[in-house]
Amino acid sequence: MAFKPLKRINWMEISGVMVGVFFTAAVMIFAIVLYAKLFSTGMIGVEEYRLHSTFEKAFGLRPGTRVQISGVDVGQISNVEIEGDGVNMEFIIRKQYQPWITDSATVFAIRDQNLISARVINIDVHRGKGRVLEDGDYLPPGQAQDIETVLETANELLGRVNSLVDGIDTILVMAMDTGTTVGALFGSRLLYDNLNKQLSRLNDITYSGKKVLFQASGLLDTLTYSVPALMGKVDGITTDVTSLMTDLKPLPQKVDGLMGNVDSLMGNVGTMVGNVDKTLGKADDLLGEVGKLTTGIADFMETTEATLQNADDLMAGIENMWIIKRSIPSKDTVPFMVETLW
């Protein structure tokens, strides 16, 4: 069996291919790293919105300065420009952190690593408080918290202390000069006596106040122990009143029924009074007739009495006649009927 001769390897061609492969891999790795870097910095593939604020000074702040929340990068400064008496700054913030930033948040400059590190913008948030800021809203500024601000504040404080020391020095000079009003006051006992008197009064007021507070404490203790019992009694009275009101609920219906019966009774009484009135009218008429009859009978009796009197006088006259007197018996034998009946 015959062997074919091996083909010789052209290392120049292989080296060219290898260089092309390595160059392509390097470009791809560079592209991936660049994309990751741009994505992490928020330059591509990230939703963002803008806020703005106004600072007094912008030392160390420029476009591209990081914006943080509790040390976490959430955006950057996009624009810095002078506006009025301050500096207007515009921030680009990632949309995912928008729910954290409300109108109760404040923004200020700090140095996040050490005293000489670059300044960054920090947003102090109070999540859950206030309205969530939308695109283009204003973010309230706060006091910067870095060494420059501390030194500036300390310088202002030292200036105020210097002014205070100068004022105290002036007062001391005036106090030592007896020709001034302050020196006259400090040079006499009047000010000290008045001050001592006022301190004594303040001591008396403090003592009286302590007594009042002690009495108030005793009253509060009394109320603490007495009020529950009183409230229990009030609760019992309320329960009794409620029961009484429940029992009294049917009473108006009963009163209405009783008033209806009384109205019916009064109607019957009215009818009866009318009937009695009619009966009394009839009786009055009857009494009038009886009165007339009685008057007639009285007149008849008077007439009869007069007639009998005349008859009696006639009989007496006849008895006195001598002719008849002899004929009359000494004793009556026949009764006089009319006189007897009368």
Image (cartoon, helix red, strand yellow):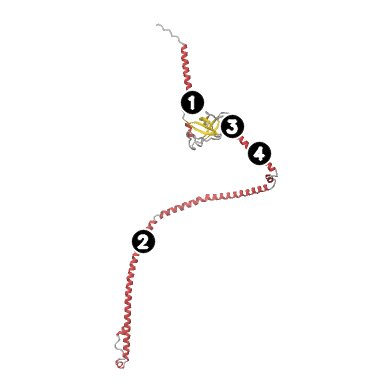
Kindly state the secondary structure of the residue where label 1 is placed.
Answer: helix
The single residue placed furthest to the front in the displayed view is 84
Q: Are the two marked residues, 3 and 2, in contact with CB atoms closer than 8 angstroms?
A: no
Q: Are marks 4 and 3 in contact (CB under 8 Å)?
A: no
Picture coordinates of residue 134 (x, y %)? 47, 34
User: Label 2 is placed on what type of residue?
Assistant: Asp
**Residue labelled with disc 1:** 38
Three-letter amino acid code of the residue under disc 1: Leu
Q: Quadrant of residue 115?
A: top right
Type of amino acid under label 4: Asp
Q: Which numbered dot is residue 166?
A: 4
Dot 4: element: helix
> Which-is-in-front pick, marks 3 and 2?
3
Q: Residues within 10 Å of mark 4 (few under 14, many from 20)?
A: few
- Give whichever of discs 4 and 2 has the lower sequence position: 4
In terms of depth relative to the viewer, which is nearer, 237 or 80? 80
Of the two numbered discs 1 and 2 in the rendering, the one whose residue sits closer to the viewer:
1
Q: How far is disc 4 from disc 1 in space, using C-alphas?
A: 59 Å
Residue name at image x 66 percent, y 39 percent: 166
In the picture of the structure, the residue carrying the numbered disc 3 is 148
Residue 36 against residue 198 in the figure, above or below: above
Q: Secondary structure at mark 2?
A: helix
Q: Residues within 10 Å of mark 2 (few under 14, many from 20)?
A: few
Where, quadrant-wise, is the N terminus in this rendering? top left
Label 4, label 3: how many angstroms apart (C-alpha)? 27 Å
Disc 3 and disc 1: Cα gap in Å? 32 Å
Give the answer, above or below, for where 273 lies relative to 336.
above
Location of mark 2 (residue): 263
- Discs 4/2, front: 4
Task: Compare marks 3 and 1 and give the one earlier in the sequence.
Answer: 1
